[in-house]
Structure formats: C-alpha cells, structure tokens
Image (cartoon, rainbow, N blue to C red):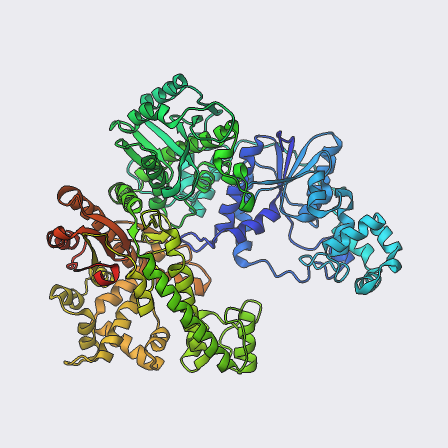
Amino acid sequence: MTQRPDIVLVDGSSYLYRAFHAMPPLTNSQGQPVGATRGILNMLKKLFDVTGPVEAAVIFDAPGKTFRDQIYPDYKANRPSMPDDLRAQIKPIHALVEALGLPLIVVPDVEADDVIGTLAAQYAAQGKSVLVSTGDKDMAQLVDQHVTLVNTMGDPWTYMDPAGVVEKFGVPPERIIDFLALVGDKVDNVPGVEKCGPKTAVKWLQAYGSLDGVMANADQVGGKVGEYLRVALDFLPTGRDLVTIKLDCEWPAVPLVVRAPDTEALRALYQELEFTSLMQTLEPSTAGASAAPSDGVLTPAQAPNAPAQTHYQLIENLDDLDTALAACRQAGTFALDTETTSVHAHQADLVGVALSWAPGQGVYIPVAHQVLEPQLAVDEIRGQLQALLKDPGMVWVAQNLKYDLRVLRRAGFTVACQTQDTLLMSYALNPTGGRHDMDSMATRYLGVATTSYETVCGKGAKQVGFETIDLATATAYAAEDADITLRLYRHLSVELARAGELKALYESLELPLVPVIADLEDLGALIDPDALALQSAELGLRLEQLEDAAHDLAGEPFNLSSPKQLQAILFEKLGLPVLKKTPKGAPSTNEEVLAELAEQYELPKLLMEHRSLSKLKGTYTDKLPLAADANGRIHTSLHQAVTSTGRLSSSDPNLQNIPIRTEEGRRIRAAFIAPAGHVLMAADYSQVELRVMAHFSQDPGMIAAFQADQDIHSATAAEVFGVDTVTADHRRAAKAINFGLIYGMSAFGLARNLHISRGEAQDYIDRYFARYPGVLRFMETTKENAQADGYVATQRGRRLYLPDINGRDQMRKRAAERLAINAPVQGTAADLIKQAMLDVDALIRRDFPDVRMLLQVHDELLFEVPLGRADAFAAALKPAMEGVKGLDVPLKVDIGRGASWYEAH
C-alpha cells in the first residue's frame, strides 16, 4: 500500500488469538496473564505508526451465539473453548483500546467479521480507502478497489488488493465466497465438499464460473471427488451463507474518530498490569529508581526520540563526507553500521558504511557496490573515517559491536574511540525479554517497524548480496539502520541508568568483553585436517558395521534414520514397549526413548551408537576441514546475547558441543593442534557451579569442604552415607546428587540416573539435605523470592525473569521453580569465567604479548603459548583465574598443556 488509507479497521478478535499464541505465557507478579495484552498493544502500535492518525476502529467478537448458529447449529462446534488465560485478558484489552483513544466496537449477536464487512462497504461506497488489518482468509471477499487487507504478523507485512487475492487464492474477490463454500472451513466447522482442496475448487470455478455453475454441472464432474460434490449439493447453499460476511448489519452509529490517549486511565491500567516501561512513558521516573524489565510496548502517541521526519543522504563525494563526519564530531556520539558481503565476519568484505548523529539523520557511504553508479573507494574515505574512529573523545554506538569491529579491522581500520553496543544493552536489561536483533528491538522499544534485510535483498535461494543493491535503496536501508541504532542507544541508556546493577553488569563485564572475543575469533584455532580425515574414514567404517548389525537384529534392511521405518521395526515387528508418543500419536523414536530402551534391548543400543557417531561425522570430522581458512584455522563465533543465564554460546562451527565423554568425541579435540614452536594450554575451573552453590547457600559443611580443598563428591558421600571409606559407587551417587540438585533433579530423575528405586533416591536426597541444610534453605528461599520479585539474579545482579513462577499451569510453574534455583548458579559461574577472560586478557597484554587466547568452552579457557613461555604463563595464569573476586569459597583452576587440545585438557 503506497499511501495512507482513510479508514483503518482492526480485526481485534484475530489480533487476540494471534497475540495469545505468538507471545510467551507471561504473567505479572499477581499471576495475572498479560502476554496477549502486551502483544496486542505492540501490534496496534506498529500498525498505527505506519497508517498514521486516520479514522479507525478496533472490532471484537461479542460473547454468545450469532445468526449463523441459527442457520447451522454445529457452526464452530469443533472449536475448543477459549483458554482461561486468554478469557481473563479480554476485559483489560478492551479497556486499554479505549484508553488509547481508539474506537472499540463490540456488537451483541454479531461477529466481528460482519461488523468489519458492513463498515468497509459503507466507507467504500463513499469512495474512501479502507485498510482492514486481519489474518482471516475469509476477509478476502471484502477486497475491491477501495478495500485492502494487511497481515502485520509477517516480515515484511503483506498487503492484499484484488490482484493479490487472485495470486493467493487463484480466484478474484467476488468468487472467494464460492471458493470457501467448496473447500469448507475446518476451524468454523463448515463442511465443504469432501476431498475438494483449493486447487480443485479453483479448477471448478474456472470451468463453471461460480458456485451455482459448479452445482448445475455437478453431474459432469467425474471421479470420487465428483461423487463427494453430488453428496454435498444439498448443503452447499447453507455453507455459502455461513461463509458470507454480512454487509448490512445494524447497530448504533459509532464515530471512528481517534482521540488523544486518556493518560490517567492508561496509568491505572499499566500499573495494574505491571507494564513498567509504559508507566515510565507517562510520567518521569524519580532519580535513582530501580527499573523492572521493559515490557516492550508503547502507546500509539509516543515513541522515544522519534523524529518528525527522516533525512537519509547518499554520500558521493569527499566534501559531503566531511560534512557528515563534522556532524558526528559535534554530536560526540554517533552510530556506525557496516554493510558487507557476508554474515561471517572473518569472510565479510566492506560494502559500505552508514552513520547517524541525531534521530532521523543518517548518511550512507557506499564503497564496493557492484553497480554502475559513482561511489567512493575505501582508501578514499580511510583517512577521514579513521580519524573519527581513533578519537578517544568520540563514542561509537553499534548494534552487535563485535561484528562491525571485526569487519572494520578486516578492512584495515583501527578503533580507539569509546564504544557502546545496543544489543548488549538490551541483553543486560532482560535476557529473555525478546530477541535482541535491531528489527525486534526497534519494534519493542521504539514502536518502529523497520525495513528488513529480506525486503531489500530477498530471502532463501533468491537472496542477493547487498553489494548488488542500487545505491538509493541501499541508502534508505543502511541509513535507517544507523538512525535506529542511535535511537535505541538513547532509549536503552535511560533504561540502564534506572537499572542499578544491570548498568554495572553491562559496563564492567559485557561491553569490555567484546574486543576480547573479537580477538579470539579473528585468530581462530589451528586444526589438523589429516587427523580429521582419518577419523572420518574410521567413523564411516564403524557406521557401516553398526548398520549391518542393526539389519541383522531386525531381520531385514531398513533406513536407520527414518522414524517411520524405526517405528515399524521396533514397535510393530519386534514388539518393544511404546514409552512415548509423538504429537500425532505415533510411537516416538527420539533419543530419550531410545536411551531408555537401550538399557534392555540390543537394537536400540546400536541405534544410539549409530546416531552418536553419525552426528560426530556429519557435524565435525567431515565439516571442520571445510570450515578452515587458508591458514588452516577454524573461526567460531561466540555469542554474548543468546543464552538466558549469561553463558557464551558458540556457532559456525559450535565448538562447545564437541562431546568429551566418549573416546570418539575426545579424539576430535586431538585435531586442534598447536603451531610449530607452541603448546596448547587449557585452564579449567574445577566444580565451579558447586562452589557457587556453597557461596549462595552459605552451608557450613559445604564451605568447609571447599576451604579444605577436599574432593567435594567424596566429602558429600561421606556425609550423606555416613561412611569413613568412600567407594566409587558412593562417590558416583554423591556426584549425581550434587549436580542433580542444582538442575532441579527430582527423586524420580535421580533414581533413573543411578538405576535405583525412587524410595532409595528420595532417602539419598533427604540425607543430603539433613547434612547440608543450607542448600535446602537456599533453594526454598530462592523460590519464595522469585515468586515475590518475578526474577532471580546472579551474584553480579544479572536477572532472569520468570513469568511462569506464579502461573496457574503447574507444569510450567515447576519448571520455573527449577530454573529459579539453577539460573543464579549457572549465571554466576558464567559471569566468573567472563571476568576471568577480562583479567587474563589484561595479563596477556601486560606480560605475555606472544600468548593468544583461542577458545572459551563452558568453564575452560584454551591458549596458544610459545614453548619457551609455557612455564611462566602457567604460573601467572593460575592465580589470575583463581583470584577472580566474588565468592566466599576459593576457586580452583586445573591447568594442562600439550601438542593438542586433547592432550592439554
């Protein structure tokens, strides 16, 4: 849609269900469900940002039956009743719509579709353009030269005019009713013609012109579907009535005038619903007040730092570049965004640079577009741009700073200015509050629908590189990215300033870690492709042997990777017990099921081994050599803003998931080698999560064990089992309890783990808590605090919000309680290893400039060290890592070294 409509009609009932299913099941501290409410506010904000202050209405279904129920008593009979969590949100949603100044229409005994149809017809008759926001396919019958549909749930939004209806359905709008009558509507329980799908309906309507024509020629339609058509003839006229949207409903006239929001009503509703960030948009916060997580929605009348208009300029000469850079210097803070040839920074060549220094202002400097348009070269802009990036008084704001930093380094730039990262700011505020990509954050924090990369470059197999995009389109897209990044920074800076410890977490831990990880990723880890090739061949041979053995046990050949064939062999032919079913009701063959069956049956045991080795071969031994650069190094990507607890995650390739419990998995680490004259050194925190538990629980027995440098599992075994001599079985059971309780393991889970009865497992747990009462007290107190606060926090204040902790769904509530115990422990351990990376990086820069940090994997750091410096570095590394502050118990680091990662670990 190229111009703003005169009238906007919102299908509120469609919004209601879509928001409910799209949003997580969020609740406030009182257990009141608020997810759909939050989602609808977001959707309305996005819509009216695009359409502007036009005449509008939001229309909802009224409760109760309608005229269609009189026509056909089974209408919508198959629909499940509205979920209680959704029903509870209808009243506050209606109240919010009215408080926002939007006309709300709910007509008794009439469906929202019919109200929308009547309004659309009335205004279209006046020659006004009408935009209907809905996800309901039935609405396609309303489309004409004046009425357009928009689906705002996709990216980009999809608009449907008459040509769009034909493209989607194969028939024009005036035939949609006939089309729907033929295919039926399972959701509304409107039977069509059995076995008549969309293609058949289109074929019939094209052949016979209309539903009446199809019915008149029913005897001409052959085959089984023709028989079904003739069976349906008596009902088709009724079906047509059911799917026809009424255009002549009557109700008291409602003016579609959008009013100014009722601030006081909004304030009361936001307070009741605990939409904290919305409260902050209505009234200034007192200085120093602590902030709850942003709820991520804004009123249609407000958007922080929103400019009256935008001005994006293409930079074609050095004079214009100087003007833009001068504006950045005068502002002191600027956003810079790179456009490149690849999402992988170590392969990405610079295509262009976008800058913004004020909301609504942005420029784009193309340097390597493959178009016949004038543009500057990288070497031409290097001097001026380098001066800005090296100025320690300037502040560069980026969205995903690490990527842009690595791209600029690759292009020959040095960065010495101050830096900020909006991605990490959002992550520090609330790791699980939504995605932290720029488009998602623009919607959540600014209420702005941005232009997506796919809109510009396409998607899937048809996607083209940004370097092929014309400069006008590239400028609009790239300058917007820089502009939005700057506006996000301004908004998030205010949020962080109110958030106390979270600001310190961002500034002292997350942000300083960016260049450390960038260095690590730039260097990469050296691999031995020959070792991987040999292992790959051996794995291939073993897989063939396993496949032959599996076929022998099954008595016939079958595809070991086919769930359907596995189901037939395991459960039909061999009669193994069905332990779990898929959502469609078929016997499950997932890993959990196979693992349990493998305890008693040989074939599932073989299948488990085959899956494990196949994954090793396909993920690592085959692919790692292909991912190496010209120097034989692997460059993983470590992500700071993915996990909920603060742990770094690895991808492309994922080096954190290399299994080390099997010899085959450990052998993959043997292919990570030291270059000539060097050694690999691994430094691993010992039992760090148990030490964190000791710190949080303040249990005297557990603290004493760590302070005495005892083997905590043996110490636990001696305490729990009351023995002086701890056997291997005792220690194994104690280890399972120690780690299991951190992750919320129940007596049932412990029993399965140790292959004992549930009663024995519960007895172990009871004795454990009797010996370590501080742990039980910590667990119970943590759950109580989580229920009161709605979140838990790490030792450094990192928060994990738990929307289900007070929910009515008991399964989700119990999962939230387990997470409440685990998250502070795992998150504090993650913060400790991040701090260790910073401290060790400082040590290397100061005293060991020839040492390189290669990887961080969970609680382990891997280094590449010159042989002659290995002893000195190990002697300095151990106290540096053990000296990380934060716990009331000592940290312990184990250090190993060798020619490969396998030898060093």
Which of the 4 quarters of the picture holds residue 197? Answer: bottom right
Foreground pick, 165 / 523: 523
Residue 127 placement (x, y as % from top left): 73, 29
Question: In percent of the image, x 58 and y 51: which residue is there?
Answer: 17
Residue 617 placement (x, y as % from top left): 40, 63
Foreground pick, 245 / 216: 216
Residue 882 in the figure: left or right of residue 471: left
Foreground pick, 499 / 629: 629
Relative to 204, say whether 580 is above or below. Answer: below
Look at the image and tell me in which quarter the C terminus lies: bottom left
For the image, the number of numbered tags is 0
Which of the 4 quarters of the picture holds residue 694? Answer: bottom left
Look at the image and tell me in which quarter the N terminus lies: top right
Residue 236 in the figure: left or right of residue 316: right
Question: In percent of the image, x 68 and y 59: which residue is there?
Answer: 186
Instruction: Determine if residue 343 is in view.
Output: yes
Relative to 584, say whether 551 is above or below. Answer: below
Instruction: Determine if residue 643 is in view.
Output: no
Relative to 779, say whether 494 is above or below. Answer: above
Residue 322 placement (x, y as % from top left): 36, 19
Question: In percent of the image, x 21 and y 71: which residue is there?
Answer: 713
Residue 667 in the figure: left or right of residue 707: right
Relative to 874, say whether 493 is above or below. Answer: above
Foreground pick, 671 / 84: 671
Residue 78 placement (x, y as % from top left): 66, 62
